[in-house]
Image (spheres, helix red, strand yellow):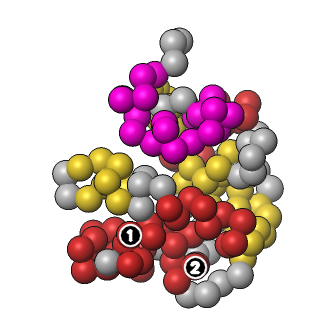
Amino acid sequence: MPARDEREYPLRSLLSTSLWRQVDGSVWDLERMWGFDAPVESVSVESLRWHLSLPFWRHGEEMFAASPNEVRERPRAHGEQLRRTLAADLDCPLIALRAAAGPLVVDGLHRLLKADLLGRDEVELKLLEPAEFAAMACGRA
């Protein structure tokens, strides 16, 4: 399948080439990801904090318009994302793809932000290998 155009995926310019090759606009089957039997490990919030600067989240009807840090800085402007963050279940591990640059969180950014807001030092993380991650893809964005 040909690589997606950067205009089709607004985060492309924010991801390194190696990370982009891993995700390349795939849509994941979250049910399969959540149920996948992978080891869970504790990782530092600090090592994942860079994710909080990327505009992964929707704001109103606009996709890729708000970063978790923007929600932290202006919670009243991002009510929907703040509600989702506060409701996030920290007993459920984040899910990340093993990448050369370090884990790439593909599910759990609300949980990561909540853990950071609460001052937690660590979060639980389920780390998927690239082949396992590819098996979770159910299409293209």
Residue at the extreme front: 13
Density class for disc 1 (Cα within 10 Å; few <14, some 14-19, many ≥20) is some
As drawn, the residue found furthest toward the bottom would be 118
* Label 2 or label 1, whichever comes before in sequence order: 1
Q: Residue at x 51, y 77 (%)?
A: 114
- As drawn, is 78 to the left or to the right of 23? left
Name the image quarter holding the C terminus.
top left
**CA distance for labels 2 and 1:** 14 Å
Query: Is 135 situated above or below 125?
Result: above
Which residue is tagged 2?
116
Q: Which mark is residue 13?
A: none
Q: Quadrant of residue 9?
A: top left
Tell me if I can see residue 38 in this picture.
yes
Q: Looking at the image, which residue sits at the far top?
A: 1
Q: Is residue 5 magenta?
A: yes
Kindly state the secondary structure of the residue where label 1 is placed: helix
Apparent side of residue 72 relative to residue 94 in the rendered image (left or right): left
Residue at 72%, 66% (x, y): give it. Answer: 47
For image coordinates 71% across by 52% down, the residue present is: 103
- In the rendered image of this protein, does residue 102 appear above or below residue 76? above
Please state the extent of the stretch shown in magenta in the rendering.
4-23
In the image, what residue type sits under mark 1?
Answer: Glu
Q: Which residue is mark 1?
A: 70
Q: Is residue 22 magenta?
A: yes
